[in-house]
Amino acid sequence: MEKKTGVYICTGCGIGESLDIEKLSSIATKEYKIPVCKTHAALCSEEGVNLIKKDMEGEGINTIIITACSPRVKYEAFDFDAPCIIERVNIREQVVWSHPANDEDTQMMAEDYLRMSVVKTQKMEIPEPYKVEDISKGILVVGGGLAGITAASEAAKAGYQVVLVEKNSSLGGWMSKMYKQAPTKPPYTDLEDPDIAARIKEVEENPSIKVYTSAEIEKIAGGPGMFDVNIKQNGNVVTERTGAIVLATGATLYDANKLHHLGFGKCANVITTDMMEELAAKGKITRPSDGKEVQSVAWILCAGSRDENHLPYCSSVCCVESLKQATYLKELNPESTAYIFYRDMRAPGQYEHFYKRVQKDKAVFIRGEVTGVSEDGSKNVIVEAEDVLTGEKIVTDALDMVVLAPGMVPTTGVGEEVLPPGVEPGSEFIPYTIIESNILKLDYRQGLEVPVLKYGFPDSNFICFPYETRRTGIYAAGTVRAPLDIPSTIQDATGAALKAIQCVESTAIGAAVHPRAGDLSYPEFFMQKCTQCKRCTEECPFGAINEDEKANPIPFITRCRRCGTCMGACPERIISFKNYSVDIIGSMIKEIEVPEEEEEKPRFVVLACENDAYAALDMAGINRMNYNAWVRVIPMRCLGSMNLVWIADALSKGIDGILLLGCKYGDDYQCHFAVGSRLSEIRLSKVSETLDRLKLESQRVRMVQVGIMDYDQVPGILDDFAAKLEELGPNPYKGF
Ligand code: SF4
Ligand code: SF4
């Protein structure tokens, strides 16, 4: 495409009053000889947008540089639905809203941003979507419990063909063994009959859902839009092609055999909550040792949960499940007594009404730590505890039975920890774990199963995008993803089905999935210069690059999330996107005007992750927080795409420092591309060679982790860095 560029400068939102717009326009018209440069008082208004549209039609403008607000806003107004390059120069949030008006440094900042955008548009091309032939929009659901059948029926209702694989001989999972379920409807006080049979029937009668029971996955090859799934059933193997996968294999209860200290395996009448459901389903709750109908039962909550020696986390539903069982104990035998030993009663939302009902039913609640469980000669169980409210030691009478409420363990298992390249064993940061659970048997270079978080749940970013695993097109739903109750499982499965639908639809048009939803660019490899170093294959967080027997990378584009981590990893700099490359960013850095040393105007480049850090900078602007005007921010798809050559380029040009702002990493707050931010820090640790070679101080390059909610700290971070650079003095390469 022959580019015809137009620069459009908005003077609204305080821009016109803060900057010399004529001078800014002259950067486009005089410095870059761009003939079309127009201003408008509200570029996002219908009139402003029409001004651009008119030029597109009349003048053939196809490269549009919108010098106005942040690219994070007004993207719908500036979507021209035509093959064109659109570049947004953020002079509102990151220039005039965060720097003094009519100030020389503020003006220089706006001018540099325009320069950087002009060169970016000169270098970039319009991405052509990567389309796959023989694409499937079908959805594979693995697991036929509540989450699996919900995901299957929701996807089918939306018009998609579904293949459902269940290892047992019938559908329904754990819920089909349930006697009663906790209240889900107003007044939220009454137990309900599980409606799983109706849900199973709906799935079995739906012609769009093909059900394989007593079946398991033998292998899954391919990627989004083209997963080839070998399913083994009755000794036969069939292959189904699907476009996305919902992993809904659920959870199991924590192994009660490890709860010897709470009497399990030691006392005949100590059972677990799942065993209680089976007993109640018989219509009369009798104790295992002698079949006597129980009169007194104690529940011990958090059995092994929130305990560093067992399950350190809360499984969220055990409290309410125990309240439910205490209620049906009373319903089946009104003369019975229920004791509930709890640490904290977690009955969130509407469950509070149910909790109050159980209190009114005169269940005996004891808040305390259970210190011992033993049995007498008649197999009655005695519980000893310390009441944390009164400080008293409690010893119960001889009880007929004790029910332990253990937590949930995802079926994906906890597996073996795998450190990313460059991370030393024993390091605090453990980015992902490869599991050996033998469920999906993926044909991926980076392991047969999806990576999991610290406790085995296969989520990848629970804050911003639940359901996403670290394998593109595979979405976890239900209790395999997180401990969930019934309504949350249904909601979760519906969400995951929608994600799977988004995935197949995006893949069909060659677009990326979340978090770069809709992005049509993808990494391209200039293979003639590849040295087969395997850095890209090893560092891709999503297993999107395989390799041949000679270690040549083979990108699997539909698996790619377009983060650019491979681009940052490649020492030969041969991986690039049509609109994002080592050359494009390097050229933007080179376009920054670096004042002479005597002007005492240092410059520093901020490479800011567009997911959080860039947004935090915008928020600082929205809140009119001021920060140093020596800053020149360049958004990164992910800090993992940071190539060390930019640092060398910037420093040799006389830029005084480089600050990397990336996502916080680790399990509690994750990088949007799983390990990109961490990989960038590892790469940065090797930058000292470059600095030594240039005889520069290592303090000139720094990385800081920021989340979007840290926006109020960002100005301080930038100002501190600026002060540090001032202290170090000018980069001696200035002027070269
Ligand atoms: S590193 Fe990122 S951009 Fe590169 S192949 Fe993997 S997912 Fe795609
Ligand atoms: S990182 Fe670059 S040089 Fe190394 S294998 Fe990948 S493409 Fe080839």
Image (cartoon, grey):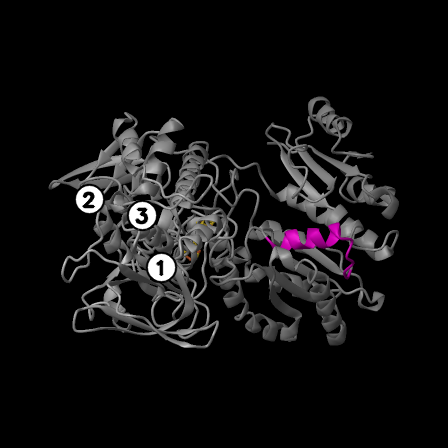
- Give the amino acid at mark 3: Glu
Percent of width and height locating residue 721: 70, 68
Q: Residues within 10 Å of mark 1 (few under 14, many from 20)?
A: many
Against 318, residue 236 (above or below) is: above
Q: Is disc 2 placed on a helix, strand or loop?
A: loop
Q: Farthest residue in the left direction?
A: 235
Q: Secondary structure at mark 1?
A: loop
Image point 43% across, 47% down: which residue?
A: 468
Marks 3/1: CA–CA distance? 37 Å
Left or right: residue 47 compared with residue 650: right
Q: CA distance from mark 2 to mark 1?
A: 22 Å
| Residue 82 in magenta stretch | no
Looking at the image, is mark 2 or mark 1 nearer the viewer?
Answer: 2
Neighbor class of circle 2 (other Cα within 10 Å; few <14, some 14-19, many 20+) is some
Q: Identify the mark at residue 456; answer none if there is no mark.
A: 1
Q: Would you say the residues marked 2 and 1 are in contact, meaning their CB atoms lie under 8 Å apart?
A: no
Between marks 3 and 2 in the image, the one whose residue lies nearer the viewer = 3
Residue 137 visible? The answer is no
Residue tagged by mark 3?
Answer: 331
Q: Which residues are magenta?
A: 612-628
What is the C-alpha distance between the residues marked 3 and 2? 32 Å
Q: Which image quadrant for residue 194? A: top left
